[in-house]
Image (cartoon, grey):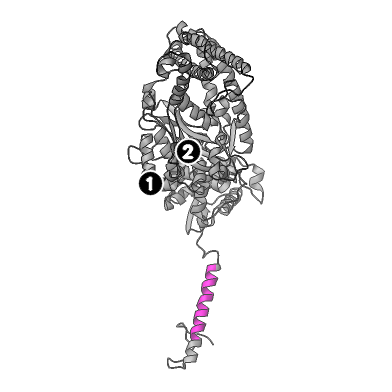
Amino acid sequence: MPLDRAGRAPGVTRNAPASASASAARLTWLAALTLLLAFAASPAARAELRIEPEPAPSAPEGRFTRALVDEVLGRLPPRWRRQERTLRLAWRDDLPDGVHGRIRGHRIGLSRALLQAEPAAELAAEAVVPGEAAVAALVHELAHVWDREHGLSRDPRLLDLAGWQVRPLWPGRTRRNPFGARSPDPYELHSPAEFVAVNLEHFVLDPGYACRRPALHAWFAAHFGWTPPATPCADTLPWVDGGALADAAAPALLELDPARVYAVDYLLAGDGDALMSRWGHSMLRLVVCAPGREPGPDCRLDLDHHRVLSFRAFVDDLQLSSWRGLTGGYPSRLFVLPLQQVVDEYTRVEMRPLDAIPLALSREEIQALLQRAARVHWSYDGRYRFVGNNCAVETWKLLHDGVPRAASARLDSITPKGLLRRLRRAGLVDDAQVPTEPSEALRLGYRYEPWSAHYQALYDTARAAIGSGPADVESWLRMPPSTRAPALERVDMRATAALLLLEQAALRREEQQARDVLKRAVFRADAGGALPALLAEALREGGAFASPAELLPMDGYGLPQAREREDARAGAEARAARLRTLDQRVEAAAHHWLPSANRHALEQTRANIATLGRRLRELHNAAGGLALPVTPETPDPL
């Protein structure tokens, strides 16, 4: 029965039976639903992004333009395509050199150079395949349109990941993006809007983006609710290990699986005597489990596998300048170092304590923090400032940018101890893990005491056997080594072992003093000879361990992938070997530069060590080869 315009059957009155009215109503809704579904199914009715060429192009140019548009629209996330918008696309001859595209309002202009770069046969073909440069240029301009409407370049979390970091002393963010190394396109550093456009290019078009910039890839995937095709990623994150400089057997490239990192500690060095270390030093300790061990508390005993993330000023000249340290004259870089090397540096050389305070982080937060630290390691080129961008500020920014929960807490501090207080206040510290018994805290590596007390105990043992000498170990070590020498021949085995360790400590001090003297001597106006050139060469070679991107070719970006990791490993091993050789040459050349007092002190201290080693072997043999009296905390002197 036909319906009238009101949806009623002709001749049916309002007083018709109820069953007839219900039947008519069902027919009305069914017709309306059918029309609605038919309308929604038609391509013209769907809300979708449309790109129309203007003016009307020639036949070959039109085929290429349509193929380009179809290719790009087919690569975009569904959410991006489902926007009811029409944009106009034109090929332009007036864009500056090197600029592939520009958008004004709803009009996109692409450089005709992209079109002219296509082979004539390609343009004439029925099935046109647009080139990568043209596809990337159109995606870039469409990304600007999406960003304008959705504000990606204003999102605080994306700005954290991008590198426009928050400032500790003033509101707002830095104007300069310091993540310039290993960039896919330096133009991304021009502004947050260009960063979004460049990275959306790679998110959509590069299957390796998820492996090279995992945190940014995850952010874009969450934003669109969609993941593009991606290549499988390695389970490990690569780091250039500073331990290879001192140990030829250590791997120059450390490949660390985040699943093996049981915990992260805030590692705080105590106050030092130098101006730059008077407020302590902030670091992060990675509690890495030995291969084969299930992650758990026992991983804290795998000390050989633990690593330290330490921001330091890379002194890229031969003369340390306090002014440059205050004004940002030195690069600030993230070094990755073996835990034992850091412990020795602070407790045995600088006589400063170390405290490891566990951070209350989830497994997901640890992985996010490690991904961020890896990007900082390979890409960051900051500037060290004693007040505004020191170790505490850099560590705070790493936590802020790597862990979203830390970003929501007010952690900004310019002192290491102030940062620890704020971490505690924000609930990001797990003090309950630290044993209350000091000896247990020492045993489990939560506390590392300076060796000053240990040296004093060793000296008390030796002094009792010598029968004379100053009361404190500092006075003993400050004595000229020739004055200490006569006492070394008349003590027993236990005292000889103690004196050997003390002489080794004295040698480290003499070497440190000699280095300070050399810095001043090399920069005299009349300085000449081989030493300045050797020192400058050593600084250049060491730059790769401060800026690992130097080891890789310029055409890659983000975290190094398989082939790049092999290049980095080979380059780092070669640099480390050259540095060890240079160190020997510097030592030989420096001998003639040192004043006679420093030279004689070094020679006599080395002679004292040789004397003690020889006497210890004699006493050991005389005792019938009994075990040497060395405490568990000290290495075997032989």
* First in sequence: mark 2 vs mark 1: 1
| Bounds of the magenta segment | 24-40
Work out how far the residue at label 2 is from the one at label 1, CA to CA, in angstroms: 27 Å
Q: Residues within 10 Å of mark 2 (few under 14, many from 20)?
A: few
Q: Secondary structure at mark 2?
A: helix
Taking the spot 58% from the left edge, 22% from the top edge, the residue there is: 628
* Residue 229 painted magenta: no
Residue hosting label 2: 440
Give the residue type that dot 2 points to. Answer: Glu
Q: Is residue 527 above or below residue 37?
A: above
Taking the spot 43% from the left edge, 45% from the top edge, the residue there is: 432
Looking at the image, can residue 402 be seen? yes
Give the residue type that dot 1 points to. Answer: Ala
Which SS type dominates the magenta stretch?
helix
Q: Is residue 183 left or right of residue 233?
A: left
Residue hosting label 1: 426
